[in-house]
Image: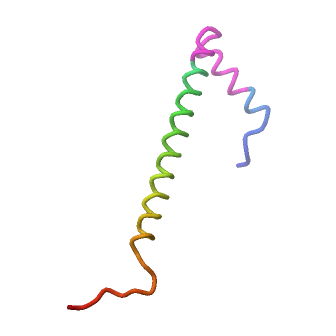
């Protein structure tokens, strides 16, 4: 099964148009866009948190020094 082509995209659009109607379509697109934006924002925050934690871990580990035994 390959990627979705233009005929399949047109058919999906027609089905969505029939199910929701022309008046609801812009509202659905707006909601989809907002949710994608929120997902992207959350993903970027998660990636920055992982990077920050990784950097903090590297700073705490000083290379070449072993802990002293008392």
Q: Which range is magenta?
A: 11-27
- Determine the image quadrant of residue 62: bottom left
Residue drawn 42% across the image and 60% down it: 53
Q: How many numbered discs, if any?
A: 0
Residue drawn 52% across the image and 30% down it: 35
Left or right for 10, reference 37: right
Q: Is residue 52 above or below residue 45?
A: below
- Determine the image quadrant of residue 37: top right
- How far across and down, in percent of the image, does residue 39 sit? 52, 38
Name the residue nearer the viewer: 49 or 30.
49
Tell me the chief SS of the magenta region.
Answer: helix
- How far across and down, in percent of the image, does residue 5 sit? 77, 38
Name the residue nearer the viewer: 42 or 24.
42
Q: Quadrant of the C terminus?
A: bottom left
Residue drawn 52% across the image and 39% down it: 41
Q: Say whether residue 24 is magenta.
A: yes
**Residue farthest to the left?**
70
Q: Is residue 29 above or below residue 21?
A: below
- How far across and down, in percent of the image, does residue 42 sit? 48, 41
């Amino acid at each position: 099964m390959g990627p979705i082509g233009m005929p399949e995209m047109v058919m999906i659009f027609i089905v969505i148009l029939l199910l929701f109607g022309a008046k609801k379509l812009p509202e659905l697109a707006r909601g989809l866009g907002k949710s994608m934006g929120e997902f992207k924002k959350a993903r970027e925050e998660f990636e920055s948190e992982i990077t920050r934690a990784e950097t903090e871990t590297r700073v705490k580990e000083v290379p070449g020094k072993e802990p002293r035994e008392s």
